[in-house]
Amino acid sequence: MRSVGDLRSLRACVRAWKQEGQRIGFVPTMGNLHAGHFSLVELAHRHAERVVASVFVNPTQFGPNEDFGRYPRTLAEDTVGLIEHGCDLLFAPAVEVMYPGGPEHTLKIHVPDVGDTLEGAHRPGHFDGVATVVAKLLVMVEPDVAVFGQKDWQQQLLVRRLVQELALPLEIITGPIVREADGLALSSRNRYLDANQRARAPELHATLEWMRSSFAEGHVRAAVEGAAVRRLERAGFAPDYAAVRRAMDLAIPAEGERTGLMALVAARLGTTRLIDNLCFD
């Protein structure tokens, strides 16, 4: 695997592969990689001959009181893992490469509707930072296919909308959530949890499963959401939301709508914010 940090080297490598007729897969990450990330690399390889992964902790998607400063940066370990899982090229740019004029002076891309609800409502500006950095990375890498994880369901919907609006010539693929044996979705932020919090964390997934079964039993959406919030609070979480939405666009389902839905939750355990989701169908 080759590692580069500058745009010229990245493009030269990708261009050479494309001239050989090889398809390019792309997996953007913020590093601190785990089995969930590596499953996306492997999925990308099933759709492309060459796979590029990026590691960049993007400052513009963190709010002023969020964990940008302490977000785990483990590039050496990430490099080893990417090699082991067949990545062909690691792009690990500095902030100056991604934001030549500085993050505070960069243009911003806002994706309305899907970017304004749930995570967008609770983390103002977050999805503007995500949309901006993803657009930059897609222009830089020029992949044929890009792979995003289902755990960040709202993010992959936003990226699909971004690609459609900008008429970018690539396919977006969503990889399934990878979970621990007790149901906890793999996340780089799981390492923030102490032993007591880690023992309680699987209740997030258990609550999603309860929401699905409760809705299937005929309970109305608002009642399911309210009960889910109370369930998480009893387990020691501080929920931001527990919502039943249309999977395709995160719109609130109409009364009597029972198919194509999913549950999404976001909650804090101590200072650690976790998200998860579960499709009903």
Image (cartoon, helix red, strand yellow):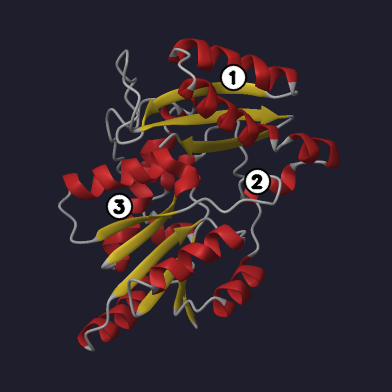
Q: Which mark is residue 173?
A: none
Give the Cα separation between the discs numbered 2 and 1: 22 Å
Q: Position of residue 13 (x, y in %)?
A: 34, 82
Callout 3, which amino acid? Ala
Residue 71: tell me if it is visible. no
Give the Cα separation between the discs numbered 3 and 1: 35 Å
What residue does disc 3 label? 135
Sequence-first disc among 3 and 1 = 3
Q: Is residue 264 above or below residue 31?
A: above
Sequence-first disc among 2 and 1 = 2
**In front: 280, or 202?**
280
Q: Position of residue 119 (x, y in %)?
A: 46, 30
**Which numbered mark, 3 or 2, is in the foreground of this view?**
2
Count how many numbered circles sit on residues in the image.
Answer: 3
**Which numbered mark, 2 or 1, is in the foreground of this view?**
1
Q: Quadrant of residue 23?
A: bottom left
Quadrant containing the C terminus in the rendered view: top left
Callout 2, which amino acid? Arg
Give the SS element for disc 2: helix
Viewed as shown, does residue 40 lie left or right of 185? left
Label 3 crowding class (10 Å Cα cut-off): few <14, some 14-19, many 20+?
some
What residue does disc 2 label? 189
Label 1 crowding class (10 Å Cα cut-off): few <14, some 14-19, many 20+?
many
Callout 1, which amino acid? Ala
Query: Looking at this rendering, what residue extends furthest in the right direction?
Result: 195
Residue at 44 percent across and 35 percent down: it is 126
